[in-house]
Image (tube, rainbow, N blue to C red):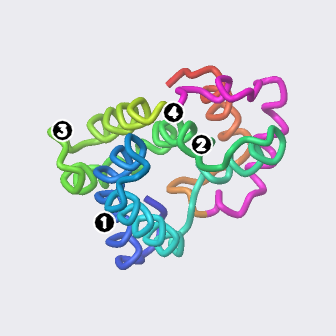
Amino acid sequence: CAPGYHPMSDGIALEGMRLIDRALPQAYADGKDIEARADMLTAASMGATAFQKGLGAVHALAHPVGAVYDTHHGLTNAILLPYVMKFNEDVIKDRMDLLGRVLNLSRCDFTGVMDWTLRFRARLGIPHDLAAIGVPADDAARIAEMAARDPSGGTNPKPVDAASLLPVFEAAVAGEL
């Protein structure tokens, strides 16, 4: 959903997500499933390629959270994702039809993709909020300021600054979608 024109990144990202939808739960359930792990290796490489288009507010927030609270970057991103999706809803909702079709969802709109995201996280044991991994809200203003300076925020679907990122971070700590 990063802005800008890069159809190759978009296509690679969509195929990577399709692979992850099937392979990650399999690899998580059975670490010896070499086919699922190979698909995840491929999907990870595809994700790195799709990064050419940008990362957005999920990573902009995850970087300072990880730096200040020593959290795992992938886990932090997974927790933050639906909160940032909700923040960006008005500018990304038109792109959710295609994503929903790629993921073979019964509901191909923002709500369908959000529901899939929340169910997918739950299947993998991902906590719903940052507080579950030891991130408090008491330093929210500092985290928002750091996130606003992170270069990843420049490719968020809509502009971000500390004032707009503060409530996103606070909601993610509290688990309030």
Task: Kindly state the secondary structure of the residue where label 4 is placed.
Answer: loop
Q: Position of residue 57 (x, y in %)?
A: 60, 50
Lower position in the chain sequence, tag 3 or tag 1: 1
User: In front: 24, or 120?
Assistant: 24
Q: Mark 4 = which residue?
A: 126
Above-or-below relation of 131 to 144: above
Task: Kindly state the secondary structure of the residue where label 1 is placed.
Answer: helix
Give the left or right position of residue 130, taking residue 112 as reference.
right
Q: Residues within 10 Å of mark 4 (few under 14, many from 20)?
A: some
Name the residue: 25% across, 42% down. Answer: 109
Q: Position of residue 25 (x, y in %)?
A: 36, 44
The amino acid type, in three-letter code, at marker 3 is: Arg
Q: Mark 3 = which residue?
A: 107
The amino acid type, in three-letter code, at marker 1 is: Glu
Work out how far the residue at label 1 is from the one at label 4, CA to CA, in angstroms.
23 Å
Q: Residues within 10 Å of mark 3 (few under 14, many from 20)?
A: some
- The label shown at residue 15 is 1
Name the residue: 66% across, 49% down. Answer: 73
Q: Nearer the viewer, mark 3 or mark 2?
A: 2
Q: Nearer the viewer, mark 1 or mark 4?
A: 4
Give the left or right position of residue 51, taking residue 135 as reference.
left
Q: Mark 2 = which residue?
A: 75
